[in-house]
Image: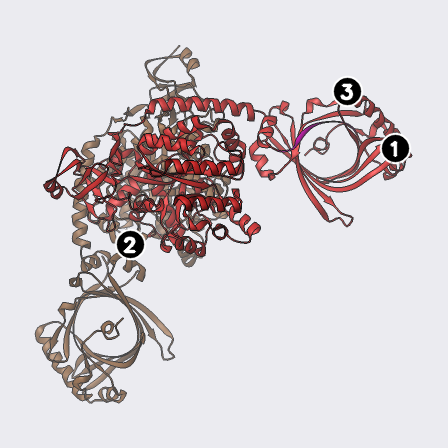
Chain colours: A brown, B red
Amino acid sequence: MERVDLILSGGTVVTMDDTFSLYPDGAVAIGGNHIVAVAPREVLLESCEAEEVLDCSDQYILPGLVNAHTHVPMTLLRGLADDLRLDVWLMGYVMPTEREFVNPEFCRLGTRLACVEQIRSGITTFADMYYFEEVIADVTADAGMRAVLGQTVLRFPTPDAESYEVSLARARRFIEAWQGHERITPAVAPHAPYSSTRELLEQCTELALEFDAPLLIHIAETRQELEDSLKQHGRRVVDQVADAGLLKAKVLAAHCVHIDPAEMRKLKVHDCSIAHCPTSNLKLASGIPPVSAMLETGIAVGIGTDGPASNNDLDMLEEVRLAAILAKTAANDPTTLPARQALLMATRQGAEALFLGERTGSLEPGKLADLIVMDARRAHNMPHFRRSEDAIYSQIVYAAKSTDVAHVMCHGRWLMRDRQLLTLDEAELIEQAQALASRVDDFLRANTGDVLSKLLTVTQGMARGESFEVQAKLVLQDESALEQLLGFEDVDVLKEVHYRQYDTWFSFEDEADGRLRYREDDELDADGQVASTRSRLTLMRLNKIDSYGTAVRLSHSRFYARADRPLRFYREYFRPSAERALEKDRRRWHIHYQGVLFYINVDRLTDPPGEQTYLELKSRTWSAEDAKVKAARIRDMLDIIGAEPADMVLADYPELHGV
Amino acid sequence: MERVDLILSGGTVVTMDDTFSLYPDGAVAIGGNHIVAVAPREVLLESCEAEEVLDCSDQYILPGLVNAHTHVPMTLLRGLADDLRLDVWLMGYVMPTEREFVNPEFCRLGTRLACVEQIRSGITTFADMYYFEEVIADVTADAGMRAVLGQTVLRFPTPDAESYEVSLARARRFIEAWQGHERITPAVAPHAPYSSTRELLEQCTELALEFDAPLLIHIAETRQELEDSLKQHGRRVVDQVADAGLLKAKVLAAHCVHIDPAEMRKLKVHDCSIAHCPTSNLKLASGIPPVSAMLETGIAVGIGTDGPASNNDLDMLEEVRLAAILAKTAANDPTTLPARQALLMATRQGAEALFLGERTGSLEPGKLADLIVMDARRAHNMPHFRRSEDAIYSQIVYAAKSTDVAHVMCHGRWLMRDRQLLTLDEAELIEQAQALASRVDDFLRANTGDVLSKLLTVTQGMARGESFEVQAKLVLQDESALEQLLGFEDVDVLKEVHYRQYDTWFSFEDEADGRLRYREDDELDADGQVASTRSRLTLMRLNKIDSYGTAVRLSHSRFYARADRPLRFYREYFRPSAERALEKDRRRWHIHYQGVLFYINVDRLTDPPGEQTYLELKSRTWSAEDAKVKAARIRDMLDIIGAEPADMVLADYPELHGV
């Protein structure tokens, strides 16, 4: 009789071992951190005895689930902003919030909340990529879970490092500090090829090789990423990182939505693994990855929830189910990725994908005691057919819920018993998370509450400014008036340019927000060909337009900056209540009039087509006194061209043309 | 002060009304079966008072969810057989089981179990199509739920009717009996266009119009259905049923995976609605329906779980989430089908799809009191952002679980309070369902346990037989021997045919199962062109082959029948342990030798290519005495052609050619 510490007795033992052994009335014996025996109940009870025998009748005993890709502190950003373009979500909400809030305390709280949710949903092991990974390691170790934790390295400043060299140094310190821990595997995580330089990828690889640490990275998540890689590097994403030597490391590549068979073979040859994140891929409209082809190539493919800001939960059973059914439609074949294989990806194969296959992922003597016990007799999961062994996997994958998980053990230690968490204070964490969310709400209300705040938030780090202009506009009845002005003795022409301008005007329900203009300027050469293009945003407050005398106005642009995103981004981010588009032909002269810089614009509306040609005279200004002086100069020039009061125009182009 | 029966107080009231009113600290007043008032808590408490005030702080109060398509008794077939081709699943497992087990008791038990699961997941209203719908109505009414119930009509015999006329009569009686019930809307449900005749569709439409009853039907679920419709009717599926006048009825069309914009407009013009079943469509690899285009066309689209045999659960929140994220990937745009719109499809718009929009689907004064209360402060759904109203819909759609549902009310009556079911005995149902499943297991074990049983199960209703043959085979060294036999005085040649034969041999782990041959026979005309094709299955038991003298064998085919399904069907259904393929050229003569019918085959293996030509002499037999007589005749003919003992062959072609 062997003495063991604990026997789980009765219930269906789903081992997920090499031969998929099932014990319908089985038992598992645990000694210390390890599984000592797995067998039919009666057989095991004849050879083992234990202090404690836990009755698991009418339950499934399974290996703990492996979450192959996530960003745990992002539980705190769950539901912050959804149903948006990836860039609006990231640049408009997540990145500004992260810049403001992500610090060690944030990571501590977010990781704890994620551990609660993961334990409740039957996860014992996960792979993470985020900032302050040493804090995440600390919390995960205390919570009793197993994890591969990757300290993120980016070529941009991050919440935990002002440069990539500092990131790398952090990663090295982190790996040194946590190497050899019984449950934490430290890793380095260059965020993605597109957010890295070749040098950064090479140095991350060297670091990983030096410590034999895993290297976590996002690969080919979106079609855009693939297209950019082809354009910038002339090759596909996996080929690009392979060239940098990255595949020499133990690489766990998340997503791989847009990889082809040759890239799969390359990953397989280098024993790299993949984390498949079906909910995230669907929700962000990234695409449907070729999972069955990956599996056929022999790659270890795990399943990941991705971060809760893009999922929005950490429910592995939901991911397993979605992985199974999505692959069928992707392959146009309902026999693709059957339940058993899907569950394998979330257990033994998931552990292999995290380079932990020798230690966890299945219920086998000698492996670590990472396991879960799920209630099997719930209404949503009845009845049970037992004619085919496949039925058990079907029940678990297609009908069981994460809330069926009753007990969770990791490394021989109970983390949850009868749905009571043993290593974390759930109620307190919920309170703290809510307090943090209220602060984030306040911050975003202040920073995205009106159009200007949103502009400032989304253009952080970009050159931008505020401008005041004095200007007059008139209908140009006769081009000779313009020639007269340009030829006038006090006028020096400094520069002449020709543009085609595409303006989109956003207006908002609250008129105090002003109007936002998105302008694309095509500069034309002498042959009328586009020589260069630039886009900019200008926010104008209507109530800031004052008359200076009868014809000259002071206009105030509260904000202007280069527009580095496409129009659709701004449309979705600012959600204007109305939108108007205008195209015009603009000839522009920079002149000195009596030594003062003015601009002359000669504009003709092309879409909607306009009958009139307009002439604008304008100059930048910076004080009331200066504005008064320049307004007088403009009136002089109006005299030179013989402008009649009737020719003067006060309205902007959108009003003039009723678009 | 208005007296009401009950006030739900505190918590976030998510009304789903026309303007999507939200009351973060709201209240709902209920009088009798109806909602009397919905307002901010303080406002409502000033104008209403009630015996009972239920505190719903930290909870969401929502309209009850509407499950727009299901087959409730099929809970009892949940997980019976998964990850199979639709036809293997249907013809190999579900239909044989339904033929044996579906009766009123089955429907009673299955519906009760489904009501348990649906109430637990927050569903108050559902649309069903099955057999014995009067039993389903009875049980649903007792369980307190609301439903549109369609009595299925098929052109084939069904478990509840031997012909479609009987089905139609049942449907009429059912509608007459249940019309005007406060919660049950009886309907007629022609199963699908492909399982109907035009006459059947017309008569169902007439019945629906006569009683102003809804008409439920499956439309364009698979690509195959669309292709068959184009081939057989020269038009797409919606066009086909429109021609039969079906769209004059109040049609709720399930699936509509393969419909085009013109079909959508046709459905819209006729105020037909659609039930979108995302899990079922993915799991059966039916495809991804164009949901955003349907919504843009203005069609009322509800969301359905489909039956639990193809889902495998009745979890509406999972369906809503999947509908939302799947539409994004289908449209390649993450802003498609935002959370609020997805939830609308499961509430107000779902009710509209069931033609119940005036009565339920939103929390508004005057509507029936169909509502649910969900816990909001669970770890998997924290924290809560309140900056944007969209955040609440995000939480419910992307992170909430059906197990968060705490209370459920339908028609002003509590069906569940604090997760305790009030109208159904869950534990007893679970016991009964399991007892039924064990009987189904026994039946399927007996009927699909060995290859012959599976054959008998899957070829039900087909002509088939058992045959014994005496035969001899030899290597034909010289074609003149054949001519000699055909020209022999006692031989009359009756017929000569020329085939190309494609044989696939399945063998099984248990040799006692025998070998199953799937044969495609291409009959060739004089020019070598294919004149006709037939496929058949033959099951041969190897251990039934006996020698009759040195060269003549008795061979026993336990089973032969026409093979009406493609090879892939049989491969998946029978799951052979090994498979061998052979192609051969066969010339065949039917002859009388001394007045007895014999066949002469002259075979040449073409793939894998064989060097030899074989000659077979064989005849059917039916008794040991007859076999002995025919064996002697065969030996005579062997003498005529001068066969040497060394030329004789005993093995079958697969062994001869080592494939």
Q: Is residue B470 magenta?
A: yes
Q: Which residue is mark 2?
A: A88
Residue A522 part of the magenta-drawn span: no
3 vs 1, front mark: 3
Closest to the observer, B209 or A10: B209
Locate residue B291, reporting x and y percent: 39, 50
Q: Is residue B28 visible?
A: yes
Q: Is residue B69 above or below residue B263?
A: above
Vertical placement of B42 versus B97: above or below?
Answer: below
Which one is nearer the viewer's eye here, B451 or A179?
Answer: B451
SS at badge 1: loop
In this view, the residue in front, A526 or B17, is B17
Mark 1 belongs to which amino acid?
A: Ile
Q: Check disc 1 and report the residue beneath it.
A: B641
Instruction: From the image, state whether disc 2 or disc 3 is nearer to you.
Output: 3
Q: Which residues are magenta?
A: B462-471
**Inter-mark Cα distance, 2 to 3:** 84 Å
In the picture of the structure, the residue carrying the numbered disc 3 is: B624
Q: Secondary structure at mark 3?
A: helix
Question: Residue B350 sits in which quadrant?
Answer: top left
Report the mark closest to the observer, 1 or 2: 1
Secondary structure type for disc 2 = helix
Q: Position of A77 compared to B112: left or right?
A: left
Left or right of B239 in this view: A185? left
Say whether residue A59 is visible: no
Q: CA distance from mark 3 to mark 1?
A: 26 Å
